[in-house]
């Protein structure tokens, strides 16, 4: 008797050419396997997953399922998929950038309890809630959950439906070290549940958890042959070593281009870029920041860290004037006290900023170059048409981030990693005096992470550039970092 295959795609070609891989795909998941679908940004990983879960009807080939021991034959009932955008919460037409910081717009947002709904198996519910630490979150609004809390909520919600297959896209991004370890431990335990199969979609080619048994590489919109995890890692390391010398030369040339940039924006001469005096932020009965004092001087490079939910993103929203409470706080930027007559746009034109909230809010299907150009005037959409010289600057930065060829491709047709690169180019495009990067390497593959880190390092070596960067991976920080601020959860 042949081995049970939970999903089997044979010579699959989808009907719609806009979401079609470049070659017919053959993929089979053995019932006892835990799979990683791995590949660089834009390789076609999400298209493959969407095909496997039946989102796109086939023009050629066959797609069959065998979900035993589940009694249901339906893919809808047996497969749960936590996609990349879900990492930041369910982005929809009703979500807008800055909503998280506007207390009066949170009233309609559902709570964790409401979203989880009723569960028939009380013992199973109790075990899951205990495992994921859900009880303290039940009455919290979904929109106020930190990245780590959101991930635990999504996992619990998916598992409460008792799926046969759980697919997670880049599950570890945005999590502090303790929460990463917790999630890894949870997934290890889940992997031991014989009735549940795990499928991870990963961009970091070198970071495949030990509970994964097999890897399916995807590259250049083509699906490779399934390999044992150990064989894939061995092949990857050999390939990476062979490419490393060439890559170093390319990145050094890239850095020289950035260092040679002329200085066009040197409006401020204040020795202080940011000053916060006894800043406190509260939402309801929860204190996020308590009497925080912080001074960032011109030319300093700060690493901002802390556990999930400690208030890092809230702090950055105050500096960027995205948080309405910022006007009730004692905050000075570039030597000017907030609320003394300057407009939001006067503040923002000297700041380059990228964050998970921004990525979540970008649902506009403009050509990628127009998304980059919107950074010139700090709009979410492109409301002011850039002139030819400005458009050339946008194209230059797209080339720096390796997405020059995507100039005219609609933003929502880019992969999540390509979208992140476009938003990074948007943050750099006006050569800002203050660069604020909140988890800038989210969702990027191994090579693009190195590229973006090299770009950040070169930019920071230019005169009087100030950086505030949030990351949960110390290895992502540029060598130019001068100072650290660690936030503790209140």
Image: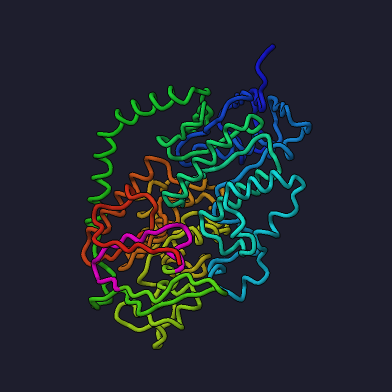
Tell me if residue 478 comes above or below residue 57 in the rendering: below
Residue 270 is situated, as x and y percent measured from the top left of the image, at 24, 78
Taking depth in this image into account, of 370 and 470 the one nearest to the observer is: 470
Q: Quadrant of the C terminus?
A: bottom left
Residue 160 is situated, as x and y percent measured from the top left of the image, at 68, 45
User: Which quadrant would residue 272 be assigned to in this image?
Assistant: bottom left
Residue 225 is situated, as x and y percent measured from the top left of the image, at 52, 22
Taking depth in this image into account, of 282 and 423 the one nearest to the observer is: 282
* Residue 303 within the magenta-colored segment of the rendering: yes
What residue lies at 59% left-to-right and 60% top-to-bottom?
136
Q: Quadrant of the N terminus?
A: top right
Q: Is residue 377 visible?
A: yes
User: Which quadrant would residue 137 be assigned to in this image?
Assistant: bottom right
Taking depth in this image into account, of 342 and 296 the one nearest to the observer is: 296
Residue 168 falls left or right of residue 325:
right
What residue lies at 63% left-to-right and 29% top-to-bottom?
194
Q: Is residue 28 visible?
A: no
Tell me if residue 207 comes above or below residue 391 in the rendering: above
Residue 1 falls left or right of residue 299:
right
* Residue 36 within the magenta-colored segment of the rendering: no
Residue 399 falls left or right of residue 443:
left
Residue 204 is situated, as x and y percent measured from the top left of the image, at 43, 39
What span is colored magenta in the figure? 295-314
Tell me if residue 77 comes above or below residue 150 in the rendering: above
User: Which quadrant would residue 105 be assigned to in this image?
Assistant: bottom right
Colouring used for the render: rainbow
């Amino acid at each position: 008797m042949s081995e049970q295959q939970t999903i089997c795609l044979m010579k699959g070609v989808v009907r719609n050419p806009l979401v079609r891989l470049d070659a017919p795909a053959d993929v089979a998941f053995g019932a006892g396997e835990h799979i990683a679908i791995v590949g660089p940004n834009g390789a076609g990983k999400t298209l493959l997953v969407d095909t496997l879960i039946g989102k796109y009807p086939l023009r050629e080939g066959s797609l069959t399922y065998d979900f035993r021991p589940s009694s249901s034959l339906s893919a809808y009932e047996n497969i749960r998929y936590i996609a990349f955008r879900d990492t930041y919460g369910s982005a929809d037409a009703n979500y807008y950038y800055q909503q998280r910081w506007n207390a009066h717009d949170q009233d309609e947002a559902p709570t964790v309890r409401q979203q989880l709904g009723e569960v028939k198996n009380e013992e199973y519910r109790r075990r899951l809630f205990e495992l994921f630490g859900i009880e303290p979150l039940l009455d919290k609004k979904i929109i106020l959950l930190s990245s780590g809390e959101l991930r635990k909520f999504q996992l619990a919600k998916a598992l409460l439906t008792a799926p046969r297959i759980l697919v997670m896209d880049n599950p570890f991004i945005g999590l502090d070290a303790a929460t990463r370890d917790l999630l890894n431990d949870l997934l290890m335990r889940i992997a031991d549940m014989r009735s549940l199969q795990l499928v991870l979609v990963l961009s970091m080619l070198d970071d495949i958890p030990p509970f994964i048994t097999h890897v399916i590489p995807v590259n250049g919109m083509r699906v490779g042959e399934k390999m044992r995890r150990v064989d894939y890692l061995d092949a990857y390391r050999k390939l990476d070593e062979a490419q490393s010398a060439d890559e170093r030369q390319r990145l050094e040339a890239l850095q020289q281009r950035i260092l040679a940039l002329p200085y066009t924006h040197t409006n401020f001469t204040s020795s202080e870029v940011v000053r916060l005096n006894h800043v406190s932020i509260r939402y309801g009965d929860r204190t996020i920041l308590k009497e925080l004092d912080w001074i960032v001087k011109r030319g300093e490079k700060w690493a901002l860290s802390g556990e999930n939910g400690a208030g890092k993103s809230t702090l950055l929203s105050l500096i960027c004037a995205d948080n309405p409470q910022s006007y009730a706080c004692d905050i000075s930027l570039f030597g000017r006290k907030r609320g003394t007559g300057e407009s939001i746009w006067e503040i923002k034109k000297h700041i380059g900023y990228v964050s998970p909230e921004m990525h979540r809010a970008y649902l506009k299907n403009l050509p990628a170059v127009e998304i980059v150009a919107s950074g010139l005037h700090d709009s979410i959409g492109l409301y002011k048409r850039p002139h030819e010289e400005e458009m050339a600057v946008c194209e230059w930065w797209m080339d720096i981030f390796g997405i020059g060829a995507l100039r005219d491709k609609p933003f929502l047709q880019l992969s999540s990693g390509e979208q992140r690169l476009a938003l990074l180019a948007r943050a750099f495009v006006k050569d800002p005096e203050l660069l604020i990067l909140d988890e800038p390497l989210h969702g990027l593959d191994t090579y693009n992470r190195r590229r973006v880190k090299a770009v950040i390092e070169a930019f920071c070596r230019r005169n009087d550039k100030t950086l505030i960067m949030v990351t949960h991976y110390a290895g992502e920080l540029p060598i130019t970092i001068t100072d650290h601020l660690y936030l503790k959860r209140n």
